[in-house]
Image (cartoon, rainbow, N blue to C red):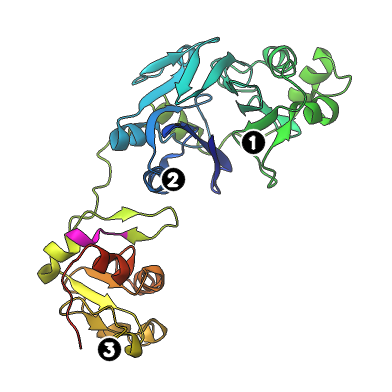
């Protein structure tokens, strides 16, 4: 099984990608991280069947709607949330299959009335949302929160899992990435050890936390599964640019070859790479500026047309897009795979 843990630094949210036999599930996607997550799914050649939100979040907007627009994935959220646009209204005991694996849906209310935990079929992993955090628990003072229900959710559902079951929360604010049932049962200061319901409720009712900064934006948006109430930003008009998992704008070589007259191709290889018997050749009409000189010579790069950067393998030219964008040039994309891939596709070259 493939597993990736992704992080949004603004909201300290963890997003989880799981896949089996090429079929993927994405748990707690973040709207602003759509390009990153979509690029990873494409690069790993996965089919995204469903996005799952553990609850209606108050600190960020879900990326579920954007994933549905991009991949046709279904949207899964607790039926109890009462949100619009849900394709799979989830309830306790349901199973979400992906490839040869599945996630069991467990209702774990308390942080909100519609909180869910997703437990892997062999009980080696569970995704707890904001119910049980690492050495903590989600607040219970808004969105139908109920400390007594949360205590029972943790004690009767989560602590019933094997001690070695790895727990992955929706957030952590101290850089911690996971915990286990056994650890939290022993060491969680709110609900672990000999803490009873009275202890837990007293702790939770005296947290004194500030009102969530994004709640007035996030909750209404999440009750629409992340669908904006206005038109989404349009993709670049000049070409089919996609963003790689590393955050690099990229455009496919076949499109570049077909539209070369409408572009400025910027070759950032060294001069000795452009000539001689070992050369891979050049794209006709390319402007040659070595990467090490680009920042000092950026004014030589014409801005009238979109720019496609290229090098031998696509690595140095990826950095060239960073330099150009830093200098205010937004219509730019990298040629992934560089001249190696260009030649592999038998696209036209010229020699010096």
Disc 1 target residue: 210
Please tell me whether residue 252 belongs to the stretch shown in magenta.
yes
Looking at the picture, tell me which residue is in the foreground, 245 or 148: 245
Q: Is residue 344 above or below residue 150?
A: below
> What is the quadrant of residue 225 in the picture?
top left
The image position of residue 20, as x and y in percent, is 48, 31
The image position of residue 3, as x and y in percent, is 55, 38
Looking at the picture, tell me which residue is in the foreground, 107 or 81: 107
Dot 3 or dot 2: first in sequence order is 2
Please tell me whether residue 13 belongs to the stretch shown in magenta.
no
Does 276 sit left or right of 284 as displayed?
right
Disc 2 target residue: 33
Looking at the rendered structure, the secondary structure element under dot 3 is loop
- Between the residue at mark 3 and the residue at mark 1, the CA separation in whole angstroms equals 64 Å
**Residue positioned 37% across, 69% down in the render:** 313
Q: Point out which mark residue 275 bears.
A: 3
Q: Is residue 104 above or below residue 39?
A: above
Which segment is the magenta one?
A: 250-254
Dot 3 or dot 1: first in sequence order is 1
**Residue positioned 15% across, 78% down in the render:** 284
The image position of residue 29, as x and y in percent, is 46, 36
Q: Marks 2 and 1: which is nearer the front?
A: 2
Looking at the picture, tell me which residue is in the foreground, 11 or 18: 18
**Residue positioned 72% across, 35% down in the render:** 179
> What is the quadrant of residue 304 in the picture?
bottom left
- Between the residue at mark 2 and the residue at mark 1, the CA separation in whole angstroms equals 25 Å
Quadrant containing the C terminus in the rendered view: bottom left
Note whether residue 158 is visible.
Answer: yes
Looking at the rendered structure, the secondary structure element under dot 2 is helix
């Amino acid at each position: 099984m493939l597993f990736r843990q992704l992080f949004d630094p603004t909201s300290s949210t963890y997003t989880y990608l799981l896949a089996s036999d090429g079929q993927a599930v994405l748990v707690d996607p973040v709207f602003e991280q759509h390009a990153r997550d979509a690029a990873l799914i494409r690069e790993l050649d996965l089919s995204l069947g469903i996005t799952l939100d553990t609850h209606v979040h108050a600190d960020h907007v879900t990326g579920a709607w954007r994933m549905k627009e991009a991949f046709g994935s279904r949207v899964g959220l607790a039926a109890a949330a009462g949100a619009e646009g849900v394709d799979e209204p989830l309830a306790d005991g349901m199973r979400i299959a992906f490839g040869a694996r599945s996630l069991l849906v467990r209702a774990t209310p308390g942080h909100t009335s519609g909180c869910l935990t997703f437990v892997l079929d062999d009980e080696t992993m569970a995704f707890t949302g904001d119910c049980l955090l690492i050495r903590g628990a989600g607040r219970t003072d808004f969105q139908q929160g109920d400390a007594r229900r949360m205590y029972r959710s943790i004690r009767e559902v989560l602590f019933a899992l094997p001690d070695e079951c790895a727990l992955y929360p929706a957030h952590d604010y101290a850089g911690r990435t996971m915990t286990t049932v056994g650890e939290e049962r022993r060491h969680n200061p709110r609900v672990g050890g000999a803490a009873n319901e009275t202890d837990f409720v007293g702790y939770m009712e005296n947290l004194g936390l500030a009102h969530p900064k994004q709640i007035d934006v996030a909750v209404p948006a999440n009750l629409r599964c992340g669908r904006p109430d206005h038109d989404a930003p349009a993709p670049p008009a000049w070409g089919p640019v996609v963003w790689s998992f590393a955050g690099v704008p990229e455009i496919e070589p076949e499109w570049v070859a077909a539209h070369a007259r409408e572009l400025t191709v910027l070759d950032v290889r060294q001069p000795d790479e452009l000539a001689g018997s070992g050369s891979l050749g050049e794209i006709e009409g390319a402007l040659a500026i070595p990467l090490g000189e680009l920042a000092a010579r950026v004014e030589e790069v014409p801005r009238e047309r979109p720019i496609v950067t290229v090098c031998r393998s696509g690595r140095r030219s990826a950095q060239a897009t960073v330099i150009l964008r830093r200098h205010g040039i937004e219509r730019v994309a990298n040629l992934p795979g560089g001249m190696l891939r260009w030649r592999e596709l038998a696209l036209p070259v010229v020699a010096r």
